């Protein structure tokens, strides 16, 4: 079952989609080019209105692009109607046909492809087993729970052995526990079927934990494509850094460099040093980004440090978050520390500390 | 919970308000008493309708033996079936077009307003205008002109319930059918149409009843031999109110009630 085929499943070439007429134009996608490799769990991540669902609907064929191409296995399908594309969709609302049984729903695509009845029945059985709904074929969708409906929607889409499975925020209607279960389930299904999954979400945790690759989108543009680790550790700009996980953003100017040490001056006047310059020259205004878990807290003066006062301590179980108000500027700096032993908790609110930043933890961002 | 209690207490206080019971009784009597009287009098033994002397079923066979009345009833059914069928097809296509050809919101609202406006035009105006139109283009008045005129005013009645049902459908259902390799026609036949069915049925029955009961427009555009039941009843009443008039009215009412009940039952079973 598992395919090892390498290569490109879907490629978007200079895709632009404009909604509305003259005067009320909305540019939902703006010159997007993107390559999605075969047999991957690929995620389109961004806030609502960023264009991720539009991109999905262009691949599915529910929308026609204003400009550009959608290539599936190297063939431009951008003008094909959805019923001629070997891709299938799991809808946010599931869109199960309420007047048909579960089995009729799952077999609908095969029936439309004029497969023989016996073959359809076998495939439906196989698909219901795959999503662990054996024996549910005779029920109506409304007799199932939200999680079960979700599985029917998956079975219905996968029954057609699509080249690409499109998932439009499929987990957003489920409660937290069920959502966690379905995340694992989706990964399992992707692995077992070898189908390329293109998954749309606005939930960064979902994206980080499930994806082989992520494209971060905003305002109709793809800002960055990479593995979850790349996106998290080396965000290309301020938006990506801010959208994925917690980040401390510090406006600063680049004041000089000695060897591989790059020096920055914060607006408070404090100087810190880093290892990268982000392509900027001396005197340039930049934004520095530091992940909360990469900074450390010291009670005395620490190296490459910023003095401040602990504003709040928030206990998260696995780790503790410290909100530090930096001296001489109105900035709150977040530091997270893993709770490995008891003594870290000795830091308390109101205490004077130094936020110590390892130079390699300092990222220089474009705005 | 607290809200339910408040509403309950509110309703309780309203019920105890002096005069509520009497007013309610008067309201319903005002609505239904004349109809009840017509039905009751259709069983009156006495030929003078206002004097009750005893119960009889004799008038019913007498009315059903009246060939003129039966012919009028048959005309009514022919007109109502034809007009409501055509109006329903027009209603379905209009609703689908206005939903799926993606007009701008203003265009959709505007077109719907245009379709529904005949509901607001005084019927007598429509009647006169339709008559003048038929005469101007040289149509001979007959059953055909009645059917045409009825089709026109039936369209909004058929269209509005269908549109409401269509707007309540998740647009993703149609996308899902396309996604699963159904072309436009099969997506319509297998997904949209079955889900739209209650709306279509409601619209068709509404159009049927409105056509069956119509008097003013029919009176103007019906030629000789195209008399419908309401027009016939009106002509009977010119001779004075007879038990036959009451029987014919009672029968018409029962048919209407029967159809409305049927449509409600069908809708309920589908839902």
Image (spheres, grey):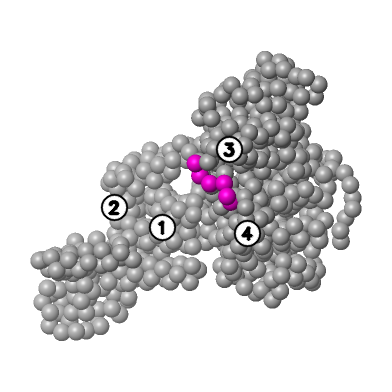
Residues indicated by labels 1 and 4 sit on the same polypeptide chain: no
Residues indicated by labels 4 and 3 sit on the same polypeptide chain: yes
Image location of residue B46, percent across then percent down: 14, 79
Q: Chain under label 2? A: B
The residue at which mark 1 appears reads as B207
Q: Nearer the viewer, mark 3 or mark 2?
A: 3
Residue at the extreme top of the image, as rendered: A283
Q: Chain under label 1? A: B
Q: Are marks 4 and 3 in contact (CB under 8 Å)?
A: no
**Above/below status of B207 relative to B126:** below
Q: Nearer the viewer, mark 4 or mark 3?
A: 3
The residue at which mark 3 appears reads as A353
The quadrant of the picture occupied by the C terminus of chain A is top right
Q: Give the Cα distance between marks 1 and 4.
A: 48 Å
Q: Are marks 3 and 2 in contact (CB under 8 Å)?
A: no
Q: Residues within 10 Å of mark 2 (few under 14, many from 20)?
A: some
In the image, what residue occupies the spot 22% across and 79% down?
A: B43
Q: Give the Cα distance between marks 4 and 3.
A: 39 Å
């Amino acid at each position: 079952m598992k395919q090892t085929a390498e290569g490109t499943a879907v490629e978007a070439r200079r895709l632009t989609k404009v909604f509305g007429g003259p005067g009320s134009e909305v540019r939902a996608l703006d010159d997007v080019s993107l390559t999605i490799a075969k047999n991957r769990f690929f995620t389109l991540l961004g806030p609502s209105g960023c264009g991720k669902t539009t991109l999905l609907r262009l691949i599915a064929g529910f929308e026609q692009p204003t400009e550009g191409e959608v290539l599936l296995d190297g063939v431009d399908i951008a003008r094909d109607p959805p019923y001629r594309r070997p891709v299938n969709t799991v809808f946010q609302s599931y869109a199960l046909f309420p007047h048909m049984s579960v089995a009729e729903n799952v077999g609908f695509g095969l029936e439309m492809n004029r497969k023989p009845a016996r073959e359809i029945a076998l495939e439906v059985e196989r698909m219901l087993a795959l999503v662990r709904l054996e024996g549910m074929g005779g029920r109506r969708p409304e007799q199932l729970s939200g999680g079960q409906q979700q599985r029917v929607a998956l079975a219905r889409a996968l029954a057609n052995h699509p080249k690409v499975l499109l998932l439009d925020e499929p987990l957003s209607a489920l409660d937290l526990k069920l959502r966690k279960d379905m995340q694992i389930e989706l990964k399992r299904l992707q692995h077992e079927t070898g189908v390329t999954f293109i998954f749309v979400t606005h939930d960064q945790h979902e994206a980080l934990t499930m994806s082989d690759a992520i494209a971060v989108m905003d305002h109709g543009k793809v800002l960055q494509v990479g593995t979850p680790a790349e996106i998290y550790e080396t965000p290309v700009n301020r938006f990506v850094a801010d959208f994925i996980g917690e980040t401390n953003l510090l406006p600063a100017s680049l004041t000089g460099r000695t060897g591989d040490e790059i020096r920055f001056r914060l607006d408070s006047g404090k100087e810190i040093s880093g290892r990268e310059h982000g392509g900027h020259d001396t005197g340039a205004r930049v934004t520095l980004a530091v992940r909360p878990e990469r900074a450390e807290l010291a009670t005395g003066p620490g190296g490459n440090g910023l003095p401040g006062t602990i504003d709040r301590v928030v206990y998260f179980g696995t780790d503790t978050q410290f909100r530090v108000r930096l001296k001489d500027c109105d900035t709150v700096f977040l530091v997270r520390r893993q709770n490995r032993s008891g003594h870290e908790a000795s830091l308390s609110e109101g205490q004077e500390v130094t936020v110590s930043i390892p130079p390699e933890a300092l990222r220089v961002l474009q705005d | 919970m607290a809200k339910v209690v408040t509403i309950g207490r509110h309703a309780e206080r309203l019920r105890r308000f002096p005069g509520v019971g009497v007013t309610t009784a008067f309201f319903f009597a005002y609505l239904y008493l004349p109809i009840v009287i017509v039905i009751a009098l259709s069983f009156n033994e006495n030929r003078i309708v206002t004097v009750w002397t005893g119960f009889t079923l004799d008038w019913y066979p007498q009315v059903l033996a009246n060939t003129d009345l039966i012919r009028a009833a048959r005309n009514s059914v022919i007109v109502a079936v034809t007009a409501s069928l055509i109006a329903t097809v027009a209603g379905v296509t209009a609703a689908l077009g206005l939903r799926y050809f993606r007009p701008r919101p203003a265009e959709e609202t505007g077109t719907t307003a245009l379709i529904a406006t005949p509901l607001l035009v005084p019927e007598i105006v429509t009647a006169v205008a339709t008559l003048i139109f038929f005469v101007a283009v040289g149509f001979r008045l007959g059953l055909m002109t009645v059917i045409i005129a009825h089709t026109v005013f039936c369209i909004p009645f058929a269209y509005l319930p269908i549109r409401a049902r269509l707007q309540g459908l998740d647009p993703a259902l149609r996308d899902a059918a396309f996604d699963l390799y159904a072309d436009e026609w099969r997506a319509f036949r297998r997904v949209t149409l079955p889900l739209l069915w209650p709306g279509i049925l409601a619209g068709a029955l509404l159009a049927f009843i409105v056509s069956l009961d119509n008097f003013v427009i029919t009176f103007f555009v019906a030629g000789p031999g195209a008399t419908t039941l309401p027009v016939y009843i009106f002509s009977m009443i010119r001779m004075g109110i007879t038990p036959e008039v009451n029987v014919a009215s009672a029968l018409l009412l029962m048919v209407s009630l029967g159809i409305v009940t049927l449509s409600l039952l069908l809708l309920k079973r589908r839902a």
